[in-house]
Image (tube, coloured by chain):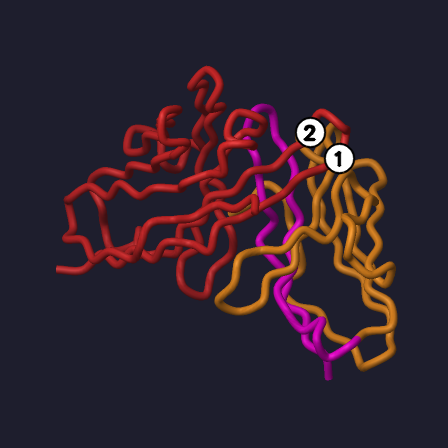
């Protein structure tokens, strides 16, 4: 049971915009930045967003992040079949790093 | 090339100890904290703990307290994860990763490929 909560699943059709939420508290998201990761089956997580809304080099601008208060969101626009994966938010709670439970995104 | 190279898969008996390695490129070894993350089959990412290789500072999540030790060998640029009293629930893929801002204020995030540990009698 993680201290930051994500919906277990999300879905969308190609071309659509989907958002994935990450809900926490004042001790974690409320006072720390949020990263987002994409994980394909059998592979290591890949960083999509850091510091709430910054994209690393090479990540398409279809991916965007935001944070407000104790919640954060990942938005994916122009959904593609390749986006079907698990997505995790990550932040800090005191000196401990925490991951959300993950959201499985299905492209219908 | 900057990379994290993890040790190979292992089969362990319940009650025994695992110790797996993460070899880190020398040019980043003391720049970032090194994290260990557990992923059980079909489950999410569980952060286990971290080490600062510059001074061996460690912090662990409560779930593994008392069973986990993370160490760093500065001579070989290797970080180790030791987990004792293994049980079937410890069967998982274990990732090492480095993350943080470098001296040029660029965020760096790199993961190993994972080490599969199977605990079974």
Using residue A9 as the reference point, say whether residue B97 is left or right of it.
Answer: left
- Which tint was used for chain B? red
Q: Position of residue A45 (x, y in %)?
A: 58, 55
Q: Where is residue A13 in the image (x, y as percent from the top left)?
A: 80, 81
- Residue situated furthest top in the rendering: B55
Residue at the disc numbered 2: B102
Residue in view at x 71 percent, y 46 percent = A23
Question: Chain for mark 1?
Answer: B
Could you confirm whether marks 2 and 1 are on the same chain? yes
Q: Give the range drawn in magenta.
A: A80-108
Q: Does the magenta stretch include residue B51?
A: no
Q: Which of B73 and B65 is in front in this view?
A: B73
Which quadrant of the view contains residue A30?
top right
Secondary structure predominantly adopted by residues drawn in magenta: strand
Chain letter of the orange region? A
**Residue B27 spot, x, y in % from top left:** 55, 32
For the residues bearing labels 2 and 1, Cβ distance under 8 angstroms: yes
Query: What residue is shown at x 49% (from left), y 38% (from top)?
Result: B25
The image shows a total of numbered marks equal to 2
* Chain letter of the residue beneath label 2 in the structure image: B
Direction bottom: furthest residue = A108
**Residue B65 sits above or below residue B16 on the image:** above
The residue that label 1 is drawn on is B106
- Residue A79, quarter of the rendered image: bottom right
Q: Is residue B38 left or right of residue A97?
A: left
**Relative image position of residue A86 (x, y in whole percent):** 61, 64
SS for dot 2:
loop
């Amino acid at each position: 049971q993680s201290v930051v909560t994500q919906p277990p699943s999300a879905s969308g059709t190609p071309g659509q915009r989907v958002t994935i939420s990450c809900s926490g508290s004042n001790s974690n998201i409320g006072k720390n930045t949020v990263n987002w990761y994409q994980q394909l089956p059998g592979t290591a997580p890949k960083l999509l967003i850091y510091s709430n809304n910054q994209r690393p080099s090479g990540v398409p601008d279809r991916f965007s992040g935001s944070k407000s208060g104790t919640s954060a969101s990942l938005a994916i626009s122009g959904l593609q079949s390749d986006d079907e994966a698990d997505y995790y938010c990550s932040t800090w709670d005191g000196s401990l790093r925490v991951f959300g439970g993950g959201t499985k995104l299905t492209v219908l | 090339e900057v990379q994290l190279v993890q040790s190979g898969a292992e089969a362990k008996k319940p009650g025994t100890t695992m110790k797996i390695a993460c070899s880190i490129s020398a040019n980043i070894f003391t720049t970032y904290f090194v994290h260990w993350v557990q992923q059980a089959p079909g489950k999410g990412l569980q952060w286990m703990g971290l080490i600062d290789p510059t001074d061996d500072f460690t912090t662990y999540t409560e779930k593994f307290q008392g069973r986990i030790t993370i160490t760093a060998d500065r001579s070989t640029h290797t970080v180790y994860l030791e987990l004792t009293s293994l049980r079937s629930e410890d069967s998982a893929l274990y990732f090492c990763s480095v993350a943080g801002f470098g001296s040029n204020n660029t965020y760096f995030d790199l993961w190993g490929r994972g080490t599969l540990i199977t605990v079974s009698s």
